[in-house]
Amino acid sequence: MKIVVGCDEAAYKLKETLKKYLEDKGNEIVDVGVYNENPSLYLETADKLCKEITNGNCERGLLLCGTGIGMAITANKVPGIRAAVAHDIFSLERMIKSNNCQVLCMGARIIAPQSAELLLDRWLEIEFKDGPSTPKVEKIMEIENEYR
C-alpha cells in the first residue's frame, strides 16, 4: 500500500518509528514532514498529506500530533477527505468499515509506539466494503458538496 505520513513536532519521534514499521511491512511511504522537533504548524502538514490522497498519489494517510485531534479537524476541512482519531481497535475498525476514512490520526501524547503498531497492523487489513454503510458515506459526501 502507498501511505502518506505526516506529523507536528510533538509526534516527530512517533512518526519516525511508525514510518519504519510500515516500511518494514512492505508499504511505500511518502513523508510530508515534519523532519525534526522544531516548532511547526500541523495545519500545513495535514494539508500536504491530504493533497497526496486527493490527487490519487496515496491510498491512505497517517497524521500524528500531540492528541490527533487537531490533525483530524484540519484534514476533515479538505473536500473528499474523511479522517478520524483512533487509539483503540473498535474505533479504528469503525472509521473504515462505517465511514470509509482514508486518514488515521493518533496522538503521540496518548498512545505508546507498541500500541500504535498493533493498530497499524489492523489498519492495513481493513477495507471499506459496499454495503449498509455506503448510504452514510454518500450522504457525507453530499453534505460536503453543498458547501463547495
Image (tube, helix red, strand yellow):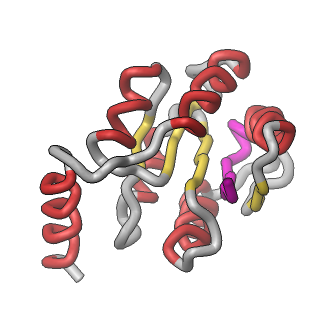
**Residue positioned 61% across, 42% down in the render:** 64
Residue 98 percent coordinates (x, y): 27, 41
**Residue positioned 56% across, 75% down in the render:** 56
Q: Quadrant of the C terminus?
A: bottom left
Against 29, residue 26 (above or below) is above
Against 143, residue 112 (above or below) is above
Residue 36 percent coordinates (x, y): 85, 49
- The answer to which image quadrant residue 44 occupies is bottom right
Q: Tell me, yes or no, whether the highlighted magenta stretch contains residue 64.
A: no
Against 82, residue 51 (above or below) is below
In magenta, the rendered stretch is 1-12
Does residue 70 appear left or right of residue 121 in this picture? left
Residue 125 percent coordinates (x, y): 55, 36
Does residue 38 appear left or right of residue 65 in this picture? right
Residue 100 percent coordinates (x, y): 35, 50
Does residue 29 appear left or right of residue 92 in this picture? right
Instruction: Tell which of 92 and 25 is nearer to you.
Output: 25
**Residue positioned 55% across, 79% down in the render:** 55
- The answer to which image quadrant residue 109 occupies is top right
Instruction: Tell which of 2 and 8 is nearer to you.
Output: 2
Instruction: Tell which of 60 and 13 is nearer to you.
Output: 60
Q: Quadrant of the N terminus?
A: bottom right
Q: Farthest bottom residue? A: 148
Q: Tell me, yes or no, whether the highlighted magenta stretch contains residue 9.
A: yes
The number of numbered badges drawn on the structure is: 0
**Residue positioned 43% across, 48% down in the render:** 72
